[in-house]
Image (cartoon, rainbow, N blue to C red):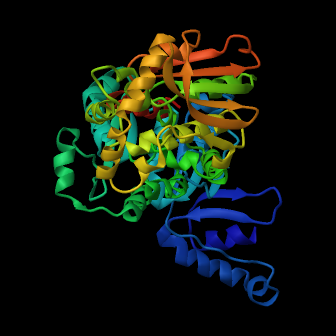
Amino acid sequence: MRLFSALAKENINIILITQASSEFSISFAVSPEDSGKAEKAIRNEFQLEIEIKKIIDLNIEMGLSIIAIVGEKMKNTPGISANLFSSLGKNGISVIATAQGSSELNISVVIKNSELRKALNSIHEGFFLSHIKDLHIYFVGTGTVGRNLLDQMQTQKRKLLEVLNLNLKLVGLSNSRKMLINKDGINLDNCLGDLDNAEKADINSFINQIKELNFRNSVFVDCTASEDIAAIYEQVFDQYASIVTANKIACSSDYSQYERLVQKAKEKGVRFLFETNVGAGLPIISTINDLIKSGDKVVGLEAVLSGTLNFIFNTLSEEISLSEAVKLAQEKGFSEPDPRIDLSGKDVMRKLLILSRESGYHIEEKDVNLIPFLPESCFVGNIDTFWTEIEKLNDKFEEKRRSLLKLNKKWRFVASLKNGKGSVELLELDDNHAAHRLEASNNIVLITTERYKDDPLMIQGYGAGAEVTAAGIFADVIRIAKV
C-alpha cells in the first residue's frame, strides 16, 4: 500500500506489476521519463527501511521494453505461454519479468530493449503471424565445397521461398583472407566478387558480429577443414546460433571436446549438425541417431568411407598405374589438394571416430588401430618427394592387382568397430562381401545393431565430391529451418 500510494501521489503511471509468491519482491514498470521521479518517491517513503534498517533494496533497470500478446482466443487455450517463452528462449532472449491478467486475455513480458526486434520477430514466427521464416546464415569457407553450396543456395532460394516460405538470408561470408558482413543480406549473385573487396578476415570479429546483430534463427555454416574455426564453435553456441559443418576436426578430436560441444548445443537449444563429416551427402549419422532414439543399439560397424581411396583402387588397371590413379583423383576433386591426407588413412580414422561416438561409444584416437598401406617414405618431405616415392610403388601394386584379379578379389580400405575398438586397414575382399561391388568413389556402411544383427543395415552411395557434399550441408541447413 505504501509503495503504490507514494507513486500515486506523484501521478506516476504503472504499466506492469508482478509479485513473486514468496512475497520477497515487487517488480513494476514505469515509463523511462518517470523513473527518476519514481525512485525519489520510493526512497522518501522507505527511507527508514532502506537507509537505517537496511531491510529493503531498490533496484532500477533501464533500457527495457514490454511485449504483450493479446487476444480473446488465448482464454482457455493451452500452450500459449509455452509457445511464447519457447519462441524467446530458443533465440537466447531472457525474460526479466512477466505478468498475466486473470482474464487470460494478455501475457506481458519484459526484455532488454536491445533484443526487441529479435523478440518480436521470434514471437511472430512462433505464433505463425508471419508466413515467411528468415534463416540468417553466417558462412565460412569458399573453397570447392563452399562455392558449390553458395551456387545451390542461389539456385534454390526462390523455390524455398515459394514452397517452404523460407527466406535464406546470407548476412556473413568469410574465407581465410576476407570477410563481409551485411545485416540487410549479401547478394548471392555476386557474393564472391563482393568478398574480394571486403575487409580483412578476423574470425573473432566475425563471431562478434553474430552477437552484435543478434538475429533470430542464426546458422553458422563451416565449409573449411580449419582447426581454428572448429575451436570457436562454443562461442557460436553462446550466441544461440546453430552450427552446420563439414569440418571433421571438432567431432574427431578429444572425446571431451566432442561431448562438450554436443552438450552445449543442447543447453542453448540450438542444433549441431555434421552429417557430411562422413559419407558426404549420405544419411549415415542421421540413420544411426534414429536407430538409437528408437531404442536400438549399435553393436558393430564396417565401412568403406574414403571415396578418394575407393576411386583410386577402382581406377587401377594395366593402363593406369597407382601414381596415375592418385593424380586422377586429385584432378577430379575427389582427393584433398595434398592427396597424402587421404592416402595416410587418418581421414578415414576420423570418420570412424565420429560414427563410433554417434553410436554411443566413448572412443579416442588411441582406440583405433590404423595400418597404413603405403611406406613411411611417402609421407616424409614435401609433395614432390611424395610423387617420386609413389611412382616407385607402381610395379609392386600392379603385380598385386593382377594376382587379386585372378582370385576375383578387390582392394578396399575398410574401417570397422567391434567390441568398442576400431581398426582401419586395406583388405582384400572377395565377391561375397557387399563392399566388393562398390563403383567409382562410392561409400558403403554396414551397421550391425541388436535389431539388424543377422543382416546388417546397409547405406551405400556417392561418398565424395564437392557437389554432393555441398548438397548434404544444404540439407542440414534446411533441417534446422524446419524445427
In front of the other: 382 or 239: 382
Q: Quadrant of residue 302?
A: top right
Figure quadrant of the N terminus:
bottom right
In front of the other: 133 or 173: 173
Q: Quadrant of residue 84?
A: top right
Q: Quadrant of residue 423?
A: top right
In front of the other: 198 or 45: 198
Residue beneath the point at 55% across and 18% down: 429
Residue 176 on image: x %, y %: 31, 57
Residue 170 on image: x %, y %: 31, 43
Q: Is residue 380 left or right of residue 483?
A: left
Q: Is residue 442 visible?
A: no
Residue beneath the point at 66% across and 46% down: 100
Q: Is residue 112 left or right of residue 340?
A: right
Q: Is residue 67 left or right of residue 462?
A: right
Residue 285 on image: x %, y %: 57, 30
Is the residue 379 above or below the residue 419 in the image? below
Residue beneath the point at 57% across and 44% down: 90
Q: Is residue 395 visible?
A: yes
